[in-house]
Amino acid sequence: MNHITIAGRLEDDPVRKEANGSVVCSFRLASGRSGAKAGRLWIDVDTWGHLAGVCYQHLAKGRHVLVAGRLTQKQWADPTTGEKRTRYLVTATEVDFLEGP
């Protein structure tokens, strides 16, 4: 079973979309020390259904959260430079709000 739990701060306001007959709320999470060259991890998070609505209503840029869910990794080559790129995505099953707005 693939499961991850990670804490971090939202880097942007969440975005809400309709997809596959449901609601998805997406946001980018920064985890690790700011300013650290190798210690910062950027992860995209998708929430679905009721959790998506709650996240969209209560989250905003800078909010500290704890996210649990399934981790996936996508790799591709940049079409202009040919450089390899990697993107991590958590499909969240739980999001805990760790501090007030």
Image: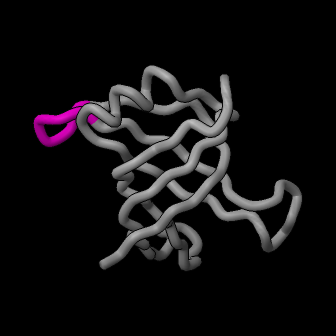
37 or 81: which is nearer to us?
Answer: 37
Q: Is residue 72 visible?
A: yes
Q: On the picture, is 57 further left or further right than 99?
A: left
Q: Is residue 11 visible?
A: no
Q: On the picture, is 11 further left or further right than 33?
A: left
Q: Is 88 included in the stretch rendered in magenta?
A: no
Image position, residue 5 (x, y; %): 51, 62
Q: Residue at x 65, y 50 (%)?
A: 8
Q: Quadrant of residue 38?
A: bottom right
Tally the numbered discs.
0
Question: What's the colour scheme?
Answer: one colour
Q: Residue at x 54, y 79 (%)?
A: 84
Outermost residue to the left: 21
Image quarter in which the C terminus is found = top right
Q: In this picture, is 34 found above or below 80?
A: above
Q: Is 19 included in the stretch rendered in magenta?
A: yes
Is the stretch drawn in magenta largely helix, strand or loop? strand
Image position, residue 42 (x, y; %): 62, 59
Image position, residue 2 (x, y; %): 35, 75
Q: Residue at x 11, y 35 (%)?
A: 21
Q: Residue at x 67, y 25 (%)?
A: 100
Outermost residue to the right: 35
Q: Which residues are magenta?
A: 18-23
Q: Quadrant of residue 73?
A: bottom left
83 or 67: which is nearer to us?
Answer: 67
Image position, residue 95 (x, y; %): 46, 44
Q: In this picture, is 85 found above or below 52?
A: below
Image quarter in which the N terminus is found = bottom left
Q: Quadrant of residue 76?
A: bottom left
Q: On the picture, is 74 further left or further right than 66?
A: left
